[in-house]
Image (cartoon, helix red, strand yellow):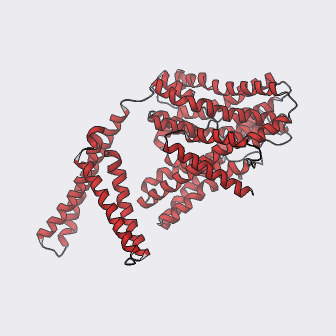
């Protein structure tokens, strides 16, 4: 029965995601809202959130996919704000939330309150990054938000383990906690890099795009489980599975520059599909947890009014503590000099947007669900965690787009810089191609048993291929949006695409008439599909 319920949830969440993408809506917000409504319908089967399933099966591929697409250069360039937001702010948020909860509910031990703080500390950047990409946030802001999402889960989950140990009475001193965090960091990164290097070696031996992608799919799970199950200094010490996944993803994403084109294309398609699938499921599961949270809250020895007020206080503190912290990290001179290079502090508009990107996600709910049953205040922890997760997604998720539009957080010179860099790179590539063509003409074409005029025509044809590609790309870069659709290059691209469509239809008709075998049709269609994809991605989308 649970399989049927899970498939229903997955199908429904994908349908809502498709609807949101079709009408330019926020898919996470829509899925969460609908899931909350469905959860309140009497008789609806309940799908309980399994923490181990989420942390082992759902979280690693999401982190890995984001890491693959992240730039190592951008990550290193923005290391200071990433560490400040992903580690320092997580710890600050956890402690502040713990203090507030312990103050409002003195009978809840501080260790239990710290568990709650660790649970609600890490933001989930899925919604923020999706909104920012759609509204054109500057690349540096996007890099910071993405980098933060890659490291904050590791910091929060490590702090979560330390807090649970304190609740159980097995935690040592503060130094012991730092040691646990240090071992988790070093060991996690080492495991991730080792697995990444191993996969690169295996892929080099395989030279098979299909098998290379298959190996890539198991990387995040292997990295996470390996790091979490390594205990070099006892059961209390282990590697961070999250950091292992991130390190492996960053390493393999950087090494993908040297992979075969077929492998890169296949990896992009595979992980894009996995992302959509898991993100839809994650936000649906968030909304569907409402009945479980309400049931657990009913067993808490407190009146509903007190629980509601404290939940609102925890939500407010979780959102508001980020605002002064982000400003402090941006403007403190000592902080700006951390890790060497002094950078110009971002404008207040950028700081305001980053301060409001604190939406929590399924990691918060999974960690709350995984709190042991004998933990004092467990029911309150789960209720408050749910309030923070849903509240931040709805409040900040709904108000972030208008905030970005009002503050106009864009870099007006970024587009021109990108165009200049791309044009310069294409010029370099064109010159390199012509230089190589001269070598080929001297070493290979001259040796062909052909008349000189045919050899010359062959050389000229190769030259035209190089020059035509450069002219089309240059037109796509330099022409304005109004001019692109009417340019000769755009019209040529559209005509070429129409010819490919016509050829595809003719082949299909031949197959239907019984004059073309299915396997031969498949082979020919794959060739046309690749050619049309090339036209669509390199010319049509940019020129129209």
Q: Quadrant of residue 215?
A: bottom right
What is the x, y in percent for residue 255?
A: 47, 53
Residue at x-position 79% and y-position 37%: 294
Which of 68/250 is in front? Answer: 68
Image position of 99 (left or right of 274): right
Q: Is residue 494 left or right of residue 320?
A: left
Whole-percent x and y of residue 126? 57, 40
The front one of 39 and 324 is: 39
Which residue is rendered at x = 74% and y = 36% of the image?
177
Q: Nearer the viewer, residue 213 or 270?
A: 270
From the top left corner, tell me how far across and down residue 479 is, in percent.
Answer: 26, 40
Location of the C terminus by quadrant is: top left
When the figure is inspected, residue 24 is found, relative to residue 340, above or below; the finding is below
Q: Residue 533: percent from the left, percent from the top?
A: 38, 56
In this orientation, does residue 218 appear? yes
Residue occupying image coordinates x 37% and y 51%? 537
Q: Quadrant of the N terminus?
A: bottom right
Residue 508, placed above or below residue 67: below
Please say whether residue 226 is visible from this viewpoint. no
Q: Is residue 257 above or below residue 484?
A: below
Q: Measuring 57% from the left and 22% from the top, which residue is drawn there? A: 328
Q: Nearer the viewer, residue 323 or 332?
A: 323
**Given the current orientation, which residue lies at the most extreme right position?**
301
Q: How many marks?
A: 0
Can you say whether 29 is above or below 53 in the image?
Answer: above
Q: Is residue 282 left or right of residue 519?
A: right
């Amino acid at each position: 029965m649970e399989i049927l319920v899970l498939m229903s949830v997955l199908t429904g969440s994908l349908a809502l995601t498709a609807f949101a993408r079709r009408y330019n809506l926020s898919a996470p917000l829509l899925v969460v809202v609908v899931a909350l409504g469905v959860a309140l319908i009497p008789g609806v089967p309940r799908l309980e959130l399994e923490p181990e399933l989420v942390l082992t099966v759902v979280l690693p591929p999401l982190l890995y996919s984001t890491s693959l697409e992240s730039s190592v250069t951008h990550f290193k360039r923005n290391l200071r704000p990433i560490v400040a937001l992903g580690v320092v702010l997580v710890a600050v948020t956890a402690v502040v939330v713990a203090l507030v909860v312990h103050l409002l509910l003195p009978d809840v031990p501080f260790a239990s309150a710290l568990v709650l703080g660790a649970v609600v500390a890490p933001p989930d950047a899925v919604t923020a990054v999706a909104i920012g990409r759609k509204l054109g946030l500057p690349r540096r802001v996007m890099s910071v938000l993405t980098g933060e999402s890659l490291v904050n889960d590791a910091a929060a989950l490590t702090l979560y383990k330390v807090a649970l140990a304190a609740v159980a009475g097995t935690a040592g001193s503060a130094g012991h906690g730092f040691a646990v965090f240090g071992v988790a960091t070093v060991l996690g990164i080492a495991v991730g890099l080792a697995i990444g290097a191993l996969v690169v070696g295996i892929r080099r031996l395989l030279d098979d795009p299909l098998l290379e992608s298959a190996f890539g799919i198991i990387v995040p799970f292997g990295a996470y489980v390996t790091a979490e199950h390594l205990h070099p200094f006892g059961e209390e010490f282990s590697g961070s599975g999250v950091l292992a996944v991130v390190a492996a993803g960053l390493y393999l994403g950087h090494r993908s520059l040297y992979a075969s084109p077929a492998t890169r294309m296949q990896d992009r398609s595979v992980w894009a599909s996995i992302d959509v699938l898991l993100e839809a499921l994650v936000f649906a599961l968030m909304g569907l947890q409402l009945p479980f949270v309400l049931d657990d809250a009913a067993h808490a020895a407190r009146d509903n009014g007190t629980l509601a007020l404290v939940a609102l206080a925890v939500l407010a503190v979780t959102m508001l503590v980020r605002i002064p912290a982000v400003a402090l990290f941006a403007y403190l001179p000592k902080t700006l000099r951390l890790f060497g290079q002094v950078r110009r502090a971002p404008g207040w508009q950028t700081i305001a947007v980053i301060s409001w990107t604190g939406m929590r996600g399924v990691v918060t709910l999974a960690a709350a669900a995984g709190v042991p049953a004998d933990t004092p205040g467990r029911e309150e922890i789960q209720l408050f965690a749910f309030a923070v997760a849903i509240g931040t997604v709805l409040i900040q998720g709904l108000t972030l787009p208008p905030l970005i539009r009002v503050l106009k957080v864009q870099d007006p010179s970024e587009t021109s810089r990108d165009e200049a860099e791309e044009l310069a790179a294409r010029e370099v590539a064109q010159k390199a191609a012509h230089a190589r063509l001269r070598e080929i003409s001297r070493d290979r074409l001259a040796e062909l048993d052909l008349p000189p005029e045919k050899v010359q025509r062959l050389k000229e044809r190769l030259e035209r291929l190089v020059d035509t590609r450069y002219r089309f790309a240059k037109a796509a870069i330099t022409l304005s949006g109004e001019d692109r659709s009417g340019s000769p290059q755009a019209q040529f691209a559209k005509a070429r695409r129409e010819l490919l469509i016509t050829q595809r239809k003719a082949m299909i008709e031949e197959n239907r008439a019984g004059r073309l075998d299915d396997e031969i049709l498949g082979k020919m269609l794959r060739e046309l599909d690749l050619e049309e994809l090339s036209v669509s991605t390199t010319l049509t989308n940019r020129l129209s």
